[in-house]
Image: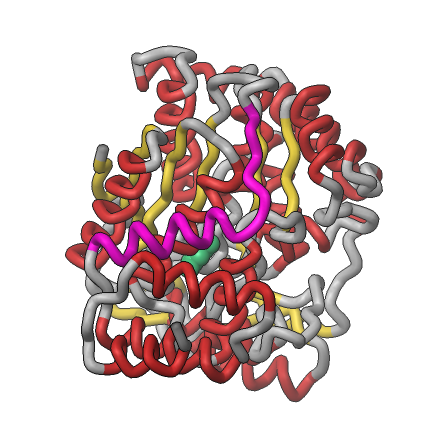
Amino acid sequence: MNIIDIIEKKKISRELTKQEIEFFINGYTDGSIADYQAAALIMAICINGMTQNEILNLTLAMANSGETLDLSEISDNIVDKHSTGGVGDKITLILSPIIAALGVPVAKMSGRGLGITGGTADKLQSIPGYNTEISIDDFKRNVKDIGISLISQTLNLAPADKKIYALRDSIGCTNSIPLIASSIMSKKIAAGASNIVLDVTCGSGAFMKDRKEAEKLAKMMNLIGEWAHRTTISIITNMDEPLGHAVGNSLEVVESINFLKGDMPEDVKEVVFTMGSYMLKLAGKGNDLKQNREKIQAVIDSGEAFEKFRELVIRQGGDVSFIDNPEKFEKAPIIVPVVSRREGYVQSLNAEVVGKAGVELGVGRKKKEDSIDPRLGFIFVKKTGDYVDDNEVLAYVHAPDAERAEEAVNRILEAYDISSLKQIKKNNILEVLY
Ligand code: URA
């Protein structure tokens, strides 16, 4: 078998066999297939798509490209969650300690930023000392001892995904249903959870820009879950504007800490409570979604969810004084307001424009080897439906220098659409698919 024949075959849209897909995945993982060859095949997949059989075979080959975890010794009811990515998406940081505080173990491997979407691993690393790169034994031990561990994709779990994920980001192949579905589900299968709740984002700041595409992706991932004997629920959520007020790594950690202490932006709350209530249901902690929401509220009110987050940070080597005193997080050198040039109602705050402005500012990476500055980002004061006066502050830019601050201010002004029409806030939960 040879990789050039496989590339040629996909180039003319023919279905690849299980053996051809495994040959590619194994060869790319062990380095015998070069980056440029993998890039050619990935681009052909991105353009021509894949059949259901190909997607399943790709997912399983990626899941089996490294070790697979068996978490049944810890619990039969481990629930994992994953988002297809968004701007200001800090749901994992908030939801994981809540679920763990409710007695459901959370063992989660998270990605770095991809394209305009942020990554939980980058956010966690903005906590001084927090180690996302622990061994498999420590990962399991943390889940056993304190009910939670959040790590990056450094373990030898689905290593093929790690390479393909970075490659896709650098060749403009992020928004492909076969590639997203196989990327997410291979990690979930390798990480061993028996139940999976997926946040399938939809809108300008998501890979899936419209509802039909989001549904297609959700159905595909549910089907893979079924094939792999994992109970999977997909929740389609709105990503037309950034989630919450903060976009940027340490800024989002601070917003998550505040959430766990009870300061909950409505849009973030809706996603956290909906996903959380389904996670509890899948974990056998209650079928009544309304009661599950009350349980979530109770562990926030009692401080148990916040305490679980502290425990996690301490266990993974982070300096907990930053969690106790978030003002200790270092500030960006320059913080400037974005001032409205007109009065009216915010019609929309385009998440894609914000995400791109973030990448330009240094919040996300342009190339996979780029370093990121955790201090940078945006705080949005006004969001869709809010009234704003002429000259009122819409947002703040946290920038590395005056020049980039000015560029970012102009980009953020472009992201806002303001007019005299009253605008209602959109529902964040669009659909739940089993
Ligand atoms: N998250 C992933 O893990 N993979 C993708 O392809 C997109 C979002």
Q: Residue at x 55, y 60 (%)?
A: 162
Q: Which residue is located at x 30 percent, y 73 percent?
A: 46
Find the magenta span and give its range. 52-71
Is residue 306 shown above or below 387?
above
The furthest residue to the bottom: 403
Q: Position of residue 174 (x, y in %)?
A: 39, 69
Q: Quadrant of ligand 1?
A: bottom left
Of 64 and 234, the residue lying toward us: 64
Above or below — where is 116 with respect to 156?
A: below
The picture quadrant where one finds residue 97 is top right
Up the image or down, 418 lies above or below 216; here it is below
**Residue 280 position in % (x across, y down):** 42, 20
Please tell me which residue lies in front, 266 or 77. Answer: 77
Q: Tell me which residue sits at (49%, 65%) in the image.
A: 165
Q: Quadrant of the N terminus?
A: bottom left
Using the image as rendered, state which of residue 318 and residue 158 is in the foreground. Answer: 158
**Residue at horizontal 75 percent and vertical 37 percent from the top:** 313
Q: Is residue 414 magenta?
A: no
Q: Quadrant of the C terminus?
A: top left
**In-image side of 281 versus 366 (left or right):** left
Name the chief secondary structure element in magenta: helix
* In this rendering, position of residue 61 left or right of residue 70: left
Residue 352 against residue 154 in the figure, above or below: below
Whether residue 85 is visible to the viewer of this picture, yes or no, is no
Is 172 placed left or right of 347 in the picture? Answer: right
